[in-house]
Image (tube, coloured by chain):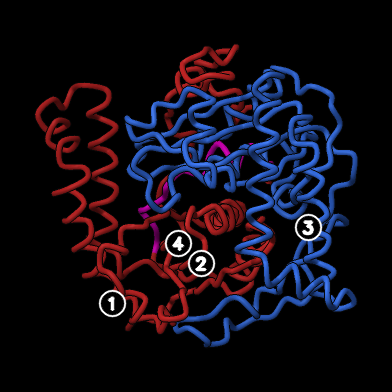
Chain colours: A red, B blue
Amino acid sequence: MDLHEALYTTRAMRRVKPDPVPMDVQARILDAAIRAPSGGNTQNWRFMMVDDPNIRARLGPLYRDCIDQLWQTVYKDRVESARANPDEPESKATNAMVSSVEHAADNFSDYPLFLFGFANGDRSGGSIFPSIWSAQLAARAEGVGSSLTTVLAYKGDAVPELLGVPVADGWKMAACVPMGYPTGRWGVAKRNPVHEVAYRNQWGNEIGFTADEPLWSPQD
Amino acid sequence: MDLHEALYTTRAMRRVKPDPVPMDVQARILDAAIRAPSGGNTQNWRFMMVDDPNIRARLGPLYRDCIDQLWQTVYKDRVESARANPDEPESKATNAMVSSVEHAADNFSDYPLFLFGFANGDRSGGSIFPSIWSAQLAARAEGVGSSLTTVLAYKGDAVPELLGVPVADGWKMAACVPMGYPTGRWGVAKRNPVHEVAYRNQWGNEIGFTADEPLWSPQD
């Protein structure tokens, strides 16, 4: 797969089929993940693939609670505003996101596979999230959809305890990535253009180029 | 460029030439970065390209101080142990890392370009580091080397103030990525194999496959 196709079309895929992800595919996903850089190349990371139906069944209600909490806290104003003004472009994006996340919350235990990432001594996240994102890009190349969530941290040590993580040794759950073969289609997700979110040399200075449309498209 | 070639060979490239990175290359790097996912697709990110020689000159001494602090704190034991036992394989890796980082610290102001990433409300780092890593992968496809550092945070608000970042509004510097055309060669970096760092369903359980050698190689 072309690098740019992966970078541009690996959007959150939360609607997936129950089909299992074969072991050789999982191996290629993880082997790509561990090629990512980490601070001082310490590789203070651990990964876990969860496919046990009993554990998946216990993850579902935990994620449901976290998402309910998310709507009532961080995203409260945004979700209420989108509900009140459904025709605004921003509202449509929010409502699509809410619908997608609600689907995940309603069906969390049905994901055939979860990738968890754990880090030790990585306060910024800069030593674990490149590897997680590499895993998601490598999954894309295998036709496996994924999405990244950090909300299970709302439950404190509940998930680490379920997975036997030695939290006393400093291991922290950084990310949970549900995976599966998507029911929908890959595509370039909408983003605020680069000239609106990038500066040159000083905050607020124009970056020096504009890109209203993506600089790569599936026809390239 | 092939996705796997990018994932496997984008190692930290700290030895670079002074040649500038053209604007169209910078645009493609940033445009790829903003396709990454962020929590709730909030895109609470800002990016900054720094190429102003005056600002670069001021970054150099700040980074030098941070690296000196790094050797005396987080990496103290590891560096001293590697110096005492230089023939151990682990020591060789550490000494190579130290040499590479020292090169960066001695020549920081000479990097022709720095990419900074800023985030707002992203406590885990999960909403900014995928985009930073995408930028590094996209840079790789352009032949531009990079490395990721978070140590400038040791200086508190010194760097954000230098760059005019509105820290009072919640914007935090997540990463600094020096960039440039490498003097060395791309290659697959050595990593602890996946079966040593990945588990299945419970911490410590075998993942179910082994991969002593990388599952992708430049010959593929």
Q: Is residue A201 magenta?
A: no
The reply to whether label 3 and label 4 mark residues of one chain is: no
Circle number at residue B71:
none
User: Which residue corresponds to mark 2?
Assistant: A119
Amino acid carrying mark 1 in the image: Ala
Q: Nearer the viewer, mark 2 or mark 3?
A: 3
> Which amino acid does the dot numbered 3 rest on?
Val
For label 1, the residue is A57
Give the residue number, with chain letter if any, for mark 4: A179
Q: Earlier in the sequence, mark 1 or mark 4?
A: 1
| Residue visible at 70% across and 34% down in the picture | B60
Q: What amino acid is at disc 2? A: Ala
Instruction: Look at the numbered disc 1 and give the secondary structure of its residue.
Output: helix
- Above or below residue B124? Residue B78 is below
Q: Circle 2 sits in a helix, a strand or a loop, which is it?
A: strand
Which residue range is magenta in the image? Answer: A2-17
Q: Residue furthest left?
A: A84
> What x and y, as percent, mark residue B6?
73, 47
Residue drawn at (41%, 81%) of the image: A168
Disc on res. B98: 3
Quadrant, the N terminus of chain B: top right
Name the one closer to the observer, A32 or B166: B166
Rounded to the nearest whole Å, what is the CA distance between mark 1 and mark 4?
A: 15 Å
* Circle 3 residues within 10 Å: few <14, some 14–19, many ≥20: some
> Label 4 near label 3: C-beta < 8 Å?
no
Q: Position of residue B157 (x, y in %)?
A: 47, 36
Label 4 amino acid?
A: Met
Q: Are marks 1 and 4 in contact (CB under 8 Å)?
A: no
Indicate which label's residue lies in the foreground, 2 or 1.
Answer: 2
